Image (cartoon, rainbow, N blue to C red):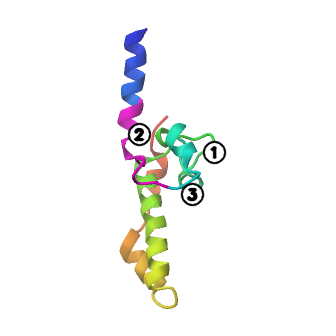
Amino acid sequence: MRLLRRLRQAFAVAWARYGPTEQDWPVPGGWPAKYMELAPVAVVDLCGGERGVSKWVDVSEPCAVWTVNALKCQQACHQTNGYKGFGACMSKCSGEPRVEWCALPES
């Protein structure tokens, strides 16, 4: 029983590595992601899942990484190219998502 519990914990830690750390999300009110390992709404909306239920391990890693990077790019491009060149900035910064990411993780 103890071995099974440790294996589950090791598996969860291995799959959750691509999730944010406390230093990445120092946002007040961001406790659900920290304590419950819930994926943010933007990640769940784009990568599949259910708001308030899906955890980082339930969504595709490449899709989640791309979504978080795209959100960061959106903020940066809006600041630097708010009136002209926003689309070009976003294309350069985040790149294009891929359809095959939707199949991961395989259940």
Pinpoint residue 13: horizontal percent, then vertical percent: 38, 33
Query: Looking at the picture, which amino acid does disc 1 mark?
Result: Glu
User: Which quadrant would residue 46 be assigned to in this image?
Assistant: bottom right
Q: Looking at the image, can residue 98 be seen?
A: no
Disc marking residue 16:
2
| Circle 2 SS class | helix
Residue 31 part of the magenta-drawn span: no
Front: mark 2 or 1: 2
Seen in the picture, residue 81 relative to 46 is either above or below; the reply is below
First in residue order: circle 3 vs circle 1: 3
Residue picked out by circle 3: 42
Quarter of the picture containing the N terminus is top left
- Identify the residue at horizontal 40%, vertical 47% (top origin): 21
Determine the residue positioned at 42% across, 59% down: 66
Query: 68 or 62: which is nearer to us?
Result: 68
Find numbered disc 3 in the image and state the secondary structure of the residue it sits on.
Answer: helix
User: Residue lying furthest bottom in this view?
Assistant: 84
Q: CA distance from mark 3 to mark 1?
A: 11 Å
In front of the other: 41 or 26: 26
Q: Residue type at mark 2: give it.
A: Ala
Q: Earlier in the sequence, mark 2 or mark 1?
A: 2
Residues packed near mark 1 inside 10 Å, few (<14), some (14 to 19) or many (20 plus):
some
Q: Is 17 covered by the magenta stretch?
A: yes
The furthest residue to the top: 1
Magenta range is 12-26
Q: What residue is at 42 percent from the left and 31 percent from the top?
A: 12
Q: Secondary structure at mark 1?
A: loop
Q: Which numbered marker is on residue 50?
A: 1
Label 2 or label 3, whichever comes before in sequence order: 2
Query: Which residue is drawn at the image coordinates 49% and 51% (left, top)?
Result: 102
Measure the alpha-carbon separation of dots 2 and 1. 17 Å
Q: Give the crowd class for mark 2: few <14, some 14-19, many >=20 residues within 10 Å.
A: some
